Image (cartoon, helix red, strand yellow):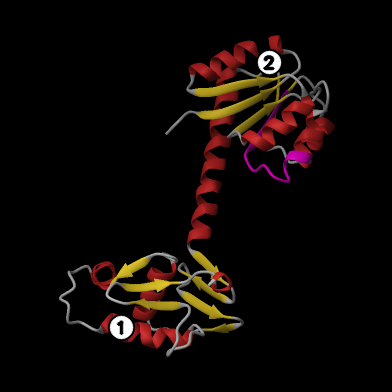
């Protein structure tokens, strides 16, 4: 894995030079931006793991940047500033910051906060990625592997455990032909003997349940001499 990226935003580079060096020495890739307006653009485009930012900036205030970038940036934002009033801290957190530290705070504590925020952001990204891969949607067909349930429109589909396993396998490889050998091996963990028709029987049972035409299927296609193809977007076929 590469180094975690921090975008440090401060109009007075001398204030954060030593902290930047300390973070770099502790395995972070730290870039510095001195202009607030440019910082907002960079945050949106570069999506750093963490933004470490002063409140008072040239071009745009840190509070405004924080509020605006939260529409399309979900990484950590840590204010590291000379402004120490309670109202400034409250405003910073209200605008979407994750933490607020005064300049002069020891470098070890700043590092610990950076590590905590980057870990939290990484966990959040992994959970979000997993959430998307565990729930698939194809037009009005929804398949949820976490709940092991599927719906066609507003109606839950009645599937046996084996039928769900097969449906999830095919749909999670939408657009890809899976041979009977591959399907059998993944579902049963043993080699296909060329005689077992259980996969074909289950496909024939699943088709009407997911709104497919058993005679002329469009969703789960039989590819002659190869296997089965789950068609993700019917509007394109």
10 Å crowding of disc 2: few (<14), some (14-19), many (20+)? few
Where is residue 27? Give x, y as percent.
47, 23
Where is residue 148? Give x, y as percent.
45, 73
Q: Which residue is the site of mark 1?
A: 200
Nearest to viewer (mark 2 / mark 1): 1
Q: Which residue is the site of mark 2?
A: 104
Vertical arrangement, residue 87 with respect to residue 34, above or below: below
Q: Quadrant of residue 2?
A: top left
Do we see residue 145 in this rendering? yes
Which residue sits at x=71%, y=26%?
A: 53
- Mark 2 or 1, nearer chain start: 2
Q: Quadrant of residue 70?
A: top right
Segment tinted magenta in the rendering: 68-80
Q: Is residue 67 left or right of residue 229?
A: right
The secondary structure type at the circle numbered 2 is loop
The front one of 19 and 35 is 35
Where is residue 213? Give x, y as percent.
47, 88
């Amino acid at each position: 894995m590469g180094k975690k990226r921090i975008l440090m935003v401060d109009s007075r580079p001398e204030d954060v030079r030593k902290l930047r060096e300390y973070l770099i020495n502790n395995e972070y890739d730290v870039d510095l931006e001195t202009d607030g307006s440019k910082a907002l653009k960079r945050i949106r485009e570069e999506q750093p793991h963490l933004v470490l930012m002063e409140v008072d900036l040239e071009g745009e205030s840190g509070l405004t940047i924080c509020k605006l970038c939260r529409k399309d940036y979900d990484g950590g934002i840590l204010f590291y500033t000379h402004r120490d009033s309670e109202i400034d801290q409250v405003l910073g957190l209200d605008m979407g910051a994750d933490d607020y530290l005064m300049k002069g705070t020891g470098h070890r504590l700043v590092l610990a906060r950076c590590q905590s925020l980057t870990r939290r952001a990484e966990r959040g990204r992994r959970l979000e990625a997993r959430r998307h891969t565990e729930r698939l949607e194809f037009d009005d067909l929804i398949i949820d592997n976490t709940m092991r349930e599927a719906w066609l429109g507003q109606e839950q589909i009645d599937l046996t455990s084996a039928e769900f396993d097969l449906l999830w396998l095919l749909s999670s490889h939408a657009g890809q032909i899976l041979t009977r050998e591959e399907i059998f091996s993944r579902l049963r963990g043993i080699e296909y003997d060329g005689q077992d028709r259980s996969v074909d029987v289950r496909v024939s049972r699943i088709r009407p349940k997911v709104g497919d035409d058993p005679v002329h299927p469009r969703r789960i296609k039989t590819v002659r001499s190869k296997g089965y193809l789950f068609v993700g977007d019917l509007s394109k076929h």
